[in-house]
Amino acid sequence: MLRRPHAPARTAAAALATASTLVLGLLAPAGAAPTAPASDRSSSAPSQAAAATAVPEGLHPLVPGHNYLDAQRIDIVFAASGAPEGADWTGYARQLLTWDGPVPLGPDGQPAGPGEEVWDLTWGPFALEPLRSRKDLFNVWYVEEPPPAVEGWDRPWGAVGGAFPVDLPHRLEVTLAWNWSGSTQAAAQVPMFTPPQTPAAGADVFDGVILGMSGEAMDAARDDGVLAHELGHALFALPDKYSFDRWGYDGPPTRSYYPVCAADQAQAEEFFGDLVGTVDPFFQEWVAAYAQHGIPLGADLEAWYREQVVVDYVPDGCFGPAGTARRSSRGGIMHDTQVVFDAVERRWAEQVLDAWSGAPAPCAPAPLAAAPLAAAPR
């Protein structure tokens, strides 16, 4: 969604409520599976009919014709909790994914019909890089049976995996929750990063995500970037960039999270010094999409958005007031749910995704590129 400078969609209090303790969930699937043709990243995925493993009862494809159960993939599973009677929540979940690219919105904030004037675009996770180019690494499902009452999920900051009534070992659960008073969030069970190691197959734990719905409204202009932000946590363990300059969050000023938040200048140079001054190339595609839909940003607004995602040694780190800490960019998806992932975040996300092949299991996990990791916070 396009938002004007200095007009964040959420209040500081709401932003603080979304702060997350994150988990490293980067590990490749384990165990043998029936032999099946390898998927091809340059073509459409094999149909589910070609898979030898039966789809678990109660599990339905959210993107028809794409899922492939006998492949080395991450399973994203949607459910609804407390949805209003008759609500087309599966259609809304499909819209939030932006599987086929950004969704044009009309004056009423709903998807624009043929010939209707376009006022905005929604940018969910699969309209953004690197997920746009790696759809073959994911299956996307939904379950009709609601998960346990969200208010009962008493982990700090909300959702954790393992609550849905399906048995997929490498799943990431997303709940659209109308019966929850909290704000949108992702949460986890362990601190973010531990010292470098090759992932042990079968040990992955992905975050769960709750999207807190407002009344009966299903507002993609509100929720699209939020889902991308929360999947940044859930898939890649990227931290919130809730800096003091934006939200007034008064946390430890030297907290360090690889690869985007460094305790001091020296560590920042080690983490992302080689990318300082760069903007992820996808930013230009993001800009061009608005022009293609007849709503160009203009030079000044484009420059302002570019400034938010250029890699730099930005004071305040991710969690604290002014001090020695540095973060990799001023804004972006992990700061205020808009624009794109910065170049540091994208490089790390691609390293994570490279641990998955999209091909049939068994397949040895690809080791992540050697890189310095910050000590886990205590």
Image (cartoon, rainbow, N blue to C red):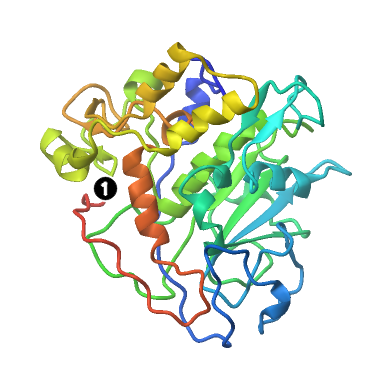
The residue depicted at 50 percent of the width and 80 percent of the height is 361
Question: How many neighbours does mark 1 have within 10 angstroms: few (below 14), some (14-19), or many (20 or more)?
Answer: few
The residue depicted at 47 percent of the width and 74 percent of the height is 29
Q: Nearer the viewer, residue 183 or 124?
A: 124
Looking at the rendered structure, the number of numbered marks drawn on it comes to 1
Q: Nearer the viewer, residue 294 or 222?
A: 294
**In this picture, residue 108 sits left or right of residue 16:** right
The residue depicted at 47 percent of the width and 28 percent of the height is 336
- Residue most extreme to the left: 266
Secondary-structure class at tag 1: loop
Question: Taking 117 as reference, is 160 above or below it?
Answer: below
Q: Pinpoint residue 324: horizontal percent, then vertical percent.
A: 16, 28
The residue depicted at 53 percent of the width and 29 percent of the height is 288
Q: Pinpoint residue 162: horizontal percent, then vertical percent.
A: 57, 63
Q: Nearer the viewer, residue 340 or 327?
A: 340
Question: Taking 305 as reference, is 240 above or below it?
Answer: below
Asked if residue 10 can be seen in this view, the reply is: yes
**In this picture, residue 348 sits left or right of residue 284:** left
| Residue ID for mark 1 | 377
**In this picture, residue 336 sits left or right of residue 267:** right
Quadrant where the N terminus sits is top right
